[in-house]
């Protein structure tokens, strides 16, 4: 309130202390959730976003550092509040808000369900409830993954056959969509899911229907890496074990990605996964290539259990690209010039040897995974793993190193 600014702004216990306490409580492990049902402006915009998880209601909720009148006065831009910082802008485009709801009733219902998953203390066991079967038959998992591994499929179809009641509370559903994050229950255990989305998705860049760009499934982009890091941090704050479902070809490459900061965003996700202290379980569903393996909690990242489906493929890069690269290096190092026929023969030999090394049986023989499992048994295997994790009551303090932003 401008006429009283000297009474509310500059001193130690004035309004700035609210933001200070907001941050300190989060660092102390006190979980905070915010619902934006009206306008949050200026300093009031920071409070919900400094909370651990944020919801916004369409039509009534908005959040921005300066409203339309101040924006017009400061920089001459004419814009309505909804287009400036409404629910679609802050949930779909900027990713500032975690959940977007059509009305207050839906928002408050989601808040209640999320509190149910909080751990009851600093020690395991974690949140539990009565077991429920999925609404969709796990037998159908065999028909979801395409035979041709380059073809797309929807990760939500897997989750509908793995989670209790097929219920999935998705995190940042409309943002960073090549990574599917959210919470659910498996065998009555609360679990946070991080899964690669293999369908081609679109990223919203504006409010018009044409304002979108396509993103390739199975690839981690800057927005999805940022989302993944944020979700891993959230599960550590809420003391929810993590399940990673890997089908990843790596991080997005190219000049546009480099200029967009893909390295720092990828590093942020790798940092969060490496420092995560809640139990981590990894399932190699399909591809597990390069740095994507690291970000999705590969062997080096301290997963309590790692299992592979027979469809898994684990390598530094895809077989075709790797084989061509290896052949090119061999010929260059030896200074050889060979016929096209001989080149094809050598390439076929390299491809076979590389394909053998990518096979999940190769990984299992070297104890890189704890077992190769029938996809239809995934629920039971994960439930047993979560039960075992609950018998180790110690959960260390969650701390990350420097997070590049």
Image: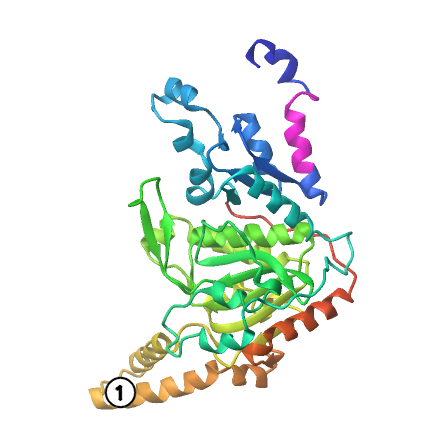
**Residue 291 in view, yes or no:** no
Q: Can residue 378 be seen in this view?
A: yes
Q: Does the magenta stretch include residue 59?
A: no
Which one is in front, 325 or 320?
A: 320
Residue at (32%, 88%) from the top-left corner? 348
* Residue that appears at 38% across and 50% down: 203
Q: Which of 50 and 85 is in front in this view?
A: 85
- Magenta part, dominant SS: helix
Q: Which region shows up in magenta?
A: 12-24
Q: Which residue lies furthest to the left in this view?
A: 339
Name of the residue lying farthest toward the top: 3
Label 1 secondary element: helix
Image height of 394 relative to 369, above or below: above
Left or right: 138 as drawn, with respect to 28: left
How far across and down, in percent of the image, does residue 100 sit? 50, 43
Q: Is residue 327 above or below residue 167?
A: below
In the rendered image, residue 17, in percent from the top left (x then y), is placed at 67, 26
- From the viewer's perspective, is 194 left or right of 124? left
Where is residue 331 drawn, in percent x and y? 29, 82
Left of 189 or right of it: where is 206?
Answer: left
> What residue do we see at 60% from left, 63% from top?
165
Its colouring scheme is rainbow
Q: Residues within 10 Å of mark 1 (few under 14, many from 20)?
A: few
**Quadrant including the N terminus:** top right
Residue 30: which quarter of the image? top right
Judge whether residue 13 is colored magenta.
yes
Q: How many labels does the image show?
A: 1
Expressed as whole percent of the image width and height from the top left, the position of residue 297 reads: 57, 65
Q: Name the residue under label 1.
A: 344
């Amino acid at each position: 309130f401008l006429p009283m600014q000297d009474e509310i702004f500059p001193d130690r216990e004035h309004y700035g202390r609210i933001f200070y306490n907001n941050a300190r409580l989060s660092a102390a492990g006190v979980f905070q959730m915010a619902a934006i049902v009206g306008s949050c402006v200026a300093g009031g915009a920071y409070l919900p976003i400094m909370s651990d998880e944020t919801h916004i209601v369409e039509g009534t909720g908005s959040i921005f550092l300066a409203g339309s009148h101040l924006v017009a006065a400061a920089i001459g831009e004419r814009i309505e509040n909804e287009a400036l910082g409404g629910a679609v802008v802050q949930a779909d485009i900027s990713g500032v808000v975690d959940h977007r709801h059509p009305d207050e009733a839906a928002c408050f219902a989601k808040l209640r369900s999320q509190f149910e998953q909080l751990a009851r203390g600093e020690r395991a066991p974690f949140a539990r409830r009565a077991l429920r079967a999925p609404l969709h038959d796990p037998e159908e998992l065999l028909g979801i993954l395409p035979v041709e591994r380059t073809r797309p499929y929807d990760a939500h179809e897997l989750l509908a056959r793995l989670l209790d009641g097929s219920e999935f509370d998705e995190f940042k559903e409309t943002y960073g969509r090549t990574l599917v994050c959210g919470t659910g229950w498996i065998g009555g255990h609360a679990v946070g899911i991080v899964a690669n989305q293999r369908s081609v998705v679109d990223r919203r860049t504006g409010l018009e229907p044409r304002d979108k760009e396509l993103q390739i499934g199975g690839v981690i982009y800057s927005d999805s890496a940022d989302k993944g890091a944020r979700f891993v941090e959230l599960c550590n704050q809420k003391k929810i074990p993590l399940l990673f479902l890997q089908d990843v070809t790596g991080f997005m490459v190219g000049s546009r990605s480099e200029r967009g900061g893909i390295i720092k965003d990828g590093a942020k996700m790798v940092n969060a996964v490496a420092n995560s202290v809640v139990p981590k379980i990894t399932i190699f569903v399909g591809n597990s290539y390069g740095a994507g393996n690291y970000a999705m909690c590969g062997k080096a990242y301290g997963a309590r259990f790692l299992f592979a489906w027979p469809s898994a493929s684990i390598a530094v890069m895809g077989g075709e690209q790797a084989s061509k690269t290896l052949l090119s290096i061999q010929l260059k190092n030896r200074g050889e010039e060979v016929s096209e026929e001989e080149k094809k023969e050598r390439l076929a030999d390299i491809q076979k040897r590389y394909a053998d090394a990518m096979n999940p049986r190769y990984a299992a023989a070297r104890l890189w995974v704890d077992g190769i499992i029938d996809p239809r048994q995934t629920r039971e295997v994960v439930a047993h793993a979560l039960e075992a994790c609950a018998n180790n009551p110690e959960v260390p303090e969650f701390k990350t190193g420097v997070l590049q932003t």
